[in-house]
């Protein structure tokens, strides 16, 4: 069963010349972990926020964002409130910015849900915290502990879909590993679907079943996590992998870089968004938008996708 | 081995009851690159700030080419000389650059202070060329530049005084991976061209592997492991270094 189906999602913002989201297609199955990877400005956070019906001011939206078959973009306010309360929950990057510092943790978790003390205790244990945190305040907890509190809070409504927007970026690497392991175990236990938004392709591949790579508001490539990393089909995915510094016995003298920057929102795009930076570019790339093509288990939107699959990395 | 360029010996610093840095010693060779790795609260940034002179150590010494930087000095000439010993690039150039000054003006101010007698226009053009910025970027205010470009301005500003040691405190942590790769390559080029030694403060083991020769691993204010970068990362001896390496996300089936 599919719990999230985003189809042909297009979003325009005032004062821009190209759509900030341009035909995004994405699905998350029940209990599935899907990662959405992209750099700053690629539209990955905007995409995940539309699932909660959170749109930037003045945004003009086309397409559908269906949660359990119901289009979020067409929901009345009361229905949307129910959705946010029960079906879909979100965890943000900085837990300290998302919690009221003046309220105790126990108070925060039970907010708006009278008689939920047993559920609060169960979830606090499930995220690996002791019950004494219920009597503590946010400033008494570390960033990693606070992120565990946020995860417990997100699970309070028993959501079928959990949106995680860079949930480990502000954390230390050992804490990140703990939170990632926690999310994986909670998925097993509660069967929650996970949409994991991150800039880190390797983290995405480590946590997710499937990965979507986003560039300039479009899905460049999607496929099973392992395949995407070992055999990227889109030149952008390959370039991202080559540019990532890794722990190596004999480091490369220089990292592979791609010239230029992602396209500005103030310029229109005629063809492929990556064309001006792409090593495989031909004239057709500048004139025609590449259609998504199924390649093996994945889908790639490129006129000259890497065949055979061996990356240079 | 020749006399080290930077010598940090037995540094300790406490904030109230919190021992931020405890008995930290390391050396950095001429033109070398040393990584200081640790998590939040490991004392790595406090160490960097002491090396720079932004904090005073409770005990211990920092010397550059034999000059002791740990003693407080007030004279203008001495302050300028010390500034030419060590410079820093911070994590967030948006916070560390003056929002009212363009790159060109920042460099001009810096050069006027340190080298009043040289041809500033030529040196500014040279510095901007070294960090890969053009005329448009030189005239733009920080808010009109991208994160990568701002970090290039911060690097050019630090290099303007021809420092012996450049401290990079999480200098690439806030950048997208493609921009990060460009800046890391730029730093490697600059190290070859100028012979400036690097002190890399970071939590990212991939970055350390890419740009440093030697490495110290800090935890709770102390150094727990040290050695050549390749050795520490491939045969970690301390349990904490092993934990750090095990925490780097690695998808199943990929080595």
Image: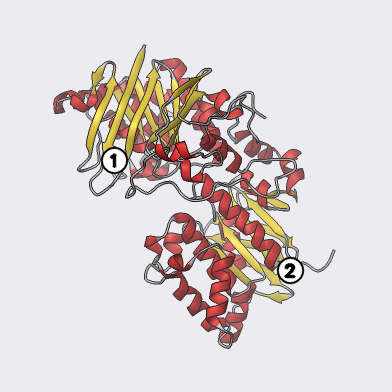
Task: Name which quarter of the figure residue A104 lies in.
Answer: top left
Residue occupied by mark 1: A103
Q: Residue B240: horizontal and vertical position, in percent?
A: 66, 40
Q: Nearer the viewer, mark 1 or mark 2?
A: 2
Q: Residue B8: horizontal and vertical position, in percent?
A: 70, 64
At mark 1, the secondary structure is: loop
- The vertical placement of B211 against A73, above or below, is below
Return the mark for residue A301: none
The answer for which chain carries disc 2 is B
Q: Residue A236: horizontal and vertical position, in percent?
A: 51, 37
Residue A129 visible: no
Q: Is residue A222 left or right of residue A102?
A: right
Q: Residue at x 31, y 24 (%)?
A: A7
Residue B183 visible: yes
Rate crowding at label 2 as few (under 14), some (14 to 19) or many (20 or more) other CA atoms within 10 Å.
many
Q: CA distance from mark 1 to mark 2?
A: 52 Å
């Amino acid at each position: 069963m599919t719990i999230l189906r985003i189809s042909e999602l297009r979003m325009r913002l005032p004062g821009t010349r190209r759509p900030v989201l341009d035909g995004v297609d994405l699905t998350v199955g029940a209990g599935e972990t899907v990662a959405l990877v992209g750099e700053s400005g690629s539209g990955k956070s905007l995409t995940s926020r539309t699932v909660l019906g959170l749109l930037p001011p003045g945004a003009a939206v086309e397409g559908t964002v269906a949660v359990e078959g119901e289009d979020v973009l067409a929901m009345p306010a009361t229905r949307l409130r129910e959705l946010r309360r029960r079906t879909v929950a979100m965890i943000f990057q900085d837990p300290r910015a998302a919690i009221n510092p003046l309220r105790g943790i126990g108070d925060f978790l039970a907010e708006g849900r009278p008689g939920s003390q047993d559920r609060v205790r169960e979830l606090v244990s499930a995220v690996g915290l002791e019950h004494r945190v219920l009597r503590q305040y946010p400033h008494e907890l570390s960033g990693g502990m606070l992120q565990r509190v946020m995860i417990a809070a997100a699970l309070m409504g028993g959501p079928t879909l959990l949106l995680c927007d860079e949930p480990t970026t502000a954390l230390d690497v050992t804490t990140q590993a703990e939170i990632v392991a926690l999310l994986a175990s909670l998925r097993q236990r509660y069967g929650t679907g996970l949409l994991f938004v991150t800039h880190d392709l390797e983290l995405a591949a480590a946590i997710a079943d499937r990965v979507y790579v986003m560039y300039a508001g479009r899905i460049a490539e999607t496929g099973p996590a392992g395949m995407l990393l070992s055999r990227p089909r889109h030149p952008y995915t390959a370039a991202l992998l080559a540019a990532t510094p890794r722990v190596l016995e004999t480091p490369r003298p220089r990292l592979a870089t791609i010239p230029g920057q992602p396209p500005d929102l103030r310029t229109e795009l005629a063809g492929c968004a990556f064309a001006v930076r792409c090593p495989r570019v031909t004239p057709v790339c500048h004139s025609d938008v590449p259609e998504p093509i199924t390649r093996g288990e994945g889908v790639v939107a490129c006129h000259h996708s890497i065949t055979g699959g061996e990356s240079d990395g | 081995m020749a006399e080290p360029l930077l010598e940090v010996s037995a540094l300790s610093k406490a904030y109230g009851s919190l021992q931020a840095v405890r008995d930290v010693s390391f050396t950095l060779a001429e033109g070398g690159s040393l990584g200081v790795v640790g998590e939040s609260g490991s004392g790595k940034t406090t160490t960097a700030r002491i090396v720079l002179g932004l904090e005073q150590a409770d005990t211990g010494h920092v010397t550059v080419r034999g000059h002791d930087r740990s003693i407080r000095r007030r004279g203008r000439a001495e302050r300028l000389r010390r500034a030419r010993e060590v410079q820093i690039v911070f994590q967030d150039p948006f916070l560390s650059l003056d929002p009212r000054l363009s790159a060109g003006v920042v460099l001009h101010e810096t050069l006027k202070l340190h080298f009043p007698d040289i041809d500033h226009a030529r040196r500014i053009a040279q510095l901007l060329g070294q960090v890969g910025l053009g005329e448009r970027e030189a005239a733009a205010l920080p808010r009109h530049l991208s994160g990568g470009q701002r970090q290039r301005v911060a690097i050019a500003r630090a290099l303007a005084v021809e420092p012996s040691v450049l401290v990079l405190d999480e200098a690439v942590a806030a950048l997208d991976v493609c921009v990060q790769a460009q800046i890391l390559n730029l730093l490697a080029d600059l190290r070859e061209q100028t012979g400036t030694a690097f002190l890399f403060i970071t939590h990212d083991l991939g970055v350390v592997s890419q740009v440093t020769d030697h490495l110290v691993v800090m935890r709770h204010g102390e150094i727990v492991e040290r050695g050549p970068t390749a050795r520490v990362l491939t045969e970690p001896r301390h349990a904490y270094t092993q934990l750090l390496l095990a925490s780097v996300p690695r998808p199943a089936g990929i080595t």
